[in-house]
Image (cartoon, grey):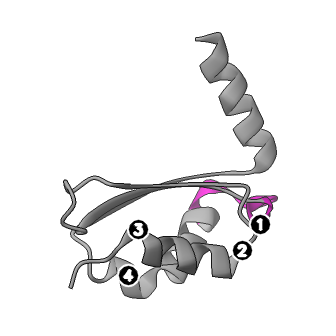
């Protein structure tokens, strides 16, 4: 059974405060490949590996039903810096 972006969003938002969330179905709509970009204050003080493990645990059931999953996780401060770099490019 394919996973929906709505299911992923609900699981992520239920697990942590979210500043920004982008979910992209990279499988052309079949629901087997997703990429998520999550910005949350819950990531403060955690390295990238700890952040990814946290998301993997939150989405454990959903990821088990996918073919591929990728993620980008930032703190709100890192996200502001990211936006500034994008604007300068």
At 55% from the left and 78% from the top, the residue drawn is: 10
Viewer-side label of 3, 2: 3
Q: Are marks 2 and 1 in contact (CB under 8 Å)?
A: yes
Q: Establish if 83 lies above or below 39.
A: above
Q: Secondary structure at mark 2?
A: loop
Residue for badge 2: 16
Residue for badge 1: 42
**Viewer-proximal residue, 16 or 44?**
16
Q: Are marks 3 and 2 in contact (CB under 8 Å)?
A: no
Report how far apart the C-alphas of labels 3 and 2 lie in the structure: 17 Å
Residue for badge 3: 5
Q: Which mark is first along the chain, 3 or 1?
A: 3
At 57% from the left and 61% from the top, the residue drawn is: 49
Q: Quadrant of the N terminus?
A: bottom left
Q: Which mark is first along the chain, 4 or 2?
A: 2
Instruction: Please provide percent x and percent y for residue 60.
Output: 44, 84
Q: Residues within 10 Å of mark 2 (few under 14, many from 20)?
A: some
Residue for badge 4: 62
Q: Which mark is first along the chain, 4 or 1?
A: 1
């Amino acid at each position: 059974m394919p996973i929906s972006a709505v299911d992923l969003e609900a699981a992520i938002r239920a697990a942590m405060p979210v500043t920004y969330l982008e979910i992209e179905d990279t499988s052309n709509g079949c629901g087997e490949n997703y990429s998520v970009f999550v910005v949350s204050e819950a990531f403060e003080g955690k390295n990238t590996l700890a952040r990814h493990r946290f998301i993997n645990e939150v989405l454990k059931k959903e990821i088990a039903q996918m073919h591929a999953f990728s993620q980008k996780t930032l703190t709100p401060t890192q996200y502001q810096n990211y936006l500034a770099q994008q604007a300068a490019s």
